[in-house]
Image (tube, rainbow, N blue to C red):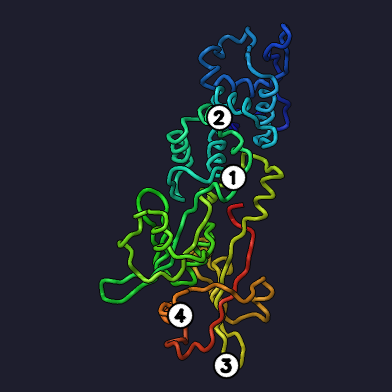
Amino acid sequence: MKSRDGRVGAAQGQAPEVQPCRLGRRRGEIRHVRVDADLELALLRGPAVGRHWSESRDDEELYIDQDPAAFKVLLDYMRSGMIQVSEVNKNVLLLAEFLGMETLVSATKIRWLVNLGRGPSLSDDSSDADIVAAFDEEYGGISEAIGAGLFPSFLAMNPPSKSQSEVAEIAMTPRPDGGNTVVAREFVGREGPNETQCGPLSAVNGLCSKGYVPSCSHVAYDYECRGDEARGDEYPEVQLLLLRRRKYIQLLPRTENVFAPSDEDRQVKSTLTRFQYACLIIHMGGQVDAILAPPEFSSDESVRSNPFGVAVIQPVPPCWAESNGFVHSKLDIARVDKQVDKAWEWVHQEIMDKLEGYRSPHDIGTVEIVEREILSKAT
């Protein structure tokens, strides 16, 4: 059975065969460690070792003239499939690259980008191979990044002041028929913005599920201040809300199957929160008639799997909002006075689209937006 980095595991219930392997020199003597045969096979498949020593020469010992302490860390990783961040130093990373341990090296590069929080543009659906290629293009590889003095940033996240932000917006855009529609627009990647047509509630929940947090400024102003012409006059629509996220934060889960979290990781994760929003439709008597909620509250799998989906809660259980941690929201969907009516017009439209029996805004009554703060999915 194969495992990470090409290792072939021993049959279940059987102890792995153990063979001697000479490892490094200290004070003129050869140090010996015992390496199980499966780990030895994994080493032979690495590009640095395999070309110098073949399986056919089974009468010879494998001699690796490398740092014994670093090699021990990698042996522990190959046995368990996980590595403690606190045990990783420059020698461990350089040896992993030298031995061609692709899974560990790839996870290292992804974690490095997450912690740096700055670098080339990547879309959320970029493959691990694309992310690694972007790292190599930017920094040249592990040894080059270490040589450039970037190693400490591998261990813990840079402060926000040293990271870049990615922005998204919720805007109203004109349709060919003369009407308008709401879009969630993400300014990420190299192919231009990603757009999703949806209602304002599903837009804000969908973007927040990707790590974005509502901001206090506007995209047009933000891009103008940074001298960036990416938005310019190409998107002149009415902007309802601007959101930001730390660059690469959405990549964090991709490394958690390799790196056991450190105390620093846990501390960072405790600060990574995201918001969810729900819309309460309240009758004149103060009773909540229906709720538009985040997709995870739906019984429909197709809705739950769509970050821009909307769950319909009707009838509403008593104290639904309080029991699920929702409180009155301070979210300002439109901060410019002339945009307020348009923003609420689209909130009403989303309600009428999702709920039967609401044919006009006059049928809706009072609408209240509630929110809750939860641990980010990026953690």
List the residue tagged with mark 2.
146
- Dot label at residue 56: none
- Mark 2 touches mark 3? (CB < 8 Å): no
Q: Residues within 10 Å of mark 4 (few under 14, many from 20)?
A: some
Most foreground residue, 145 or 62: 145
**Three-letter residue code for mark 3:** Met
List the residue tagged with mark 3.
284
Q: Nearer the viewer, mark 2 or mark 3?
A: 2
List the residue tagged with mark 4.
344
Please name the residue shown 56% across and 77% down the image: 369
Q: Position of residue 109 (x, y in %)?
A: 53, 36
Q: Nearer the viewer, mark 3 or mark 4?
A: 4
Q: Position of residue 281 (x, y in %)?
A: 55, 83
Please name the residue shown 33% across and 60% down the image: 232
Q: Is residue 213 left or right of residue 232?
A: right
Measured in 3D between alpha carbons, the distance from the residue under mark 2 to the one under mark 4, in whole angstroms, is: 52 Å
Q: Reply above or below: 376 against 159.
A: below
- Dot label at residue 158: 1
- Mark 1 touches mark 2? (CB < 8 Å): no
Mark 4, secondary structure of its residue: helix
Q: Reply above or below: 66 against 226.
A: above
Q: Position of residue 85 (x, y in %)?
A: 67, 37
Q: Nearer the viewer, mark 1 or mark 4?
A: 1
Asked where in the image residue 27 lies, by quadrant, the reply is top right
Q: Nearer the viewer, mark 3 or mark 1?
A: 1
- Mark 3 touches mark 1? (CB < 8 Å): no
Please name the residue shown 65% across and 50% down the image: 268
Q: Is residue 353 visible?
A: no
Mark 3, secondary structure of its residue: loop
**Three-letter residue code for mark 2:** Ile
